[in-house]
Amino acid sequence: MDEEIILMARLHFGDADALTELYARLGPHVYALSHALLHSREEAEEVLQDIFARLSSGGHGYRPVFGSPRAFIYTMARNASLSRLRARGARPVSLDPDLVSPDLLAARQPDLDTRVTVQGALERLTDHDQALILDAFFQGLSHLEIAARRQMPLGTVKTRLRRALLTMRRRLEEA
C-alpha cells in the first residue's frame, strides 16, 4: 500500500509514469467493479476511463489520512457507476455470490494480504452489520432503501452502518 501512496504523490506532482503504474495495478479491478455494478462492458470502460482521467488531471482530492489510494479509487469507481445507474433509473442487479467468495476474490486481487485483512475485518462484524455493509456497498442501496428492506428506522441504519465502518477501519488499522 505504501507504494500506492507514493504513486499518488508522484501523480499529484504531474508524473505521467505514476498514472501508468496505477492503471496497471488497479485498472482491471476498477473495470471489474464497474462491470459488476453496471452489467455493461461499454459503461464499465467509460467509468474506467473517467476515473483515470480525473486522476491524471490532479482534481481527484485524495488525502492519505482518509484511507488507502486503492480504497479511494475503488470508491470513485463505485460512486461513478452508481451515478450512471441512477441516471438511467436503474439499480445494480444483485451481485453474483461468486463475486464476494474468498476464492474468486483471491484470483482477482493481487494483494492477498489486503484481501485477507479486509475479509477478516468484515467477518468479525455481527451478521447484521455485515448485511448492512453488503447492502450499501455491494448492492448499491441507499440508506433509505436499506431501512425499507431491513424494516429499520433510517437513523438506525445510518448509525449502525457508520459504526460498522468505523469498527472495520479500526480493525484494518490494527492489522
Image: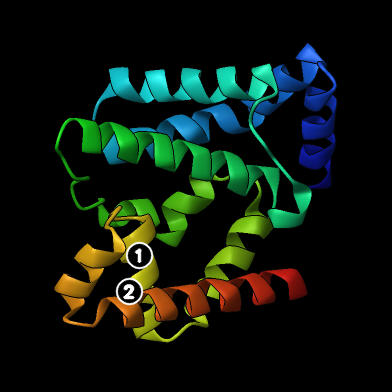
Residue furthest toward the top? 16
Where, by quadrant of the figure, is residue 60 drawn? top right
Q: Which SS class for mark 1?
A: helix
Note whether residue 175 is visible.
Answer: no
What residue is shown with label 1? 134
- Answer above or below: position of 81 versus 170: above
Where, by quadrant of the figure, is residue 8 drawn? top right
The amino acid marked with disc number 1 is: Leu
Mark 2 closeness class: few <14, some 14–19, many ≥20 residues within 10 Å: some
- Answer above or below: position of 164 versus 146: below
Q: Residue 171's spot in the image, x, y percent?
A: 66, 76
Locate the C terminus by quadrant: bottom right
- Frontmost residue, 120 versus 75: 75
In the picture, measured across the screen, residue 116 lies left or right of residue 146, that is: right
The amino acid marked with disc number 2 is: Ala
Residue that appears at 35% across and 65% down: 134
In the picture, measured across the screen, residue 28 lies left or right of residue 38, that is: right
Mark 1 closeness class: few <14, some 14–19, many ≥20 residues within 10 Å: some
Residue that appears at 74% across and 45% down: 63
Residue that appears at 19% across and 78% down: 150
Q: Residue 131's spot in the image, x, y percent?
A: 32, 74
Q: Which SS class for mark 2?
A: helix
Q: Which mark is residue 131?
A: 2
Q: How is the image coloured?
A: rainbow
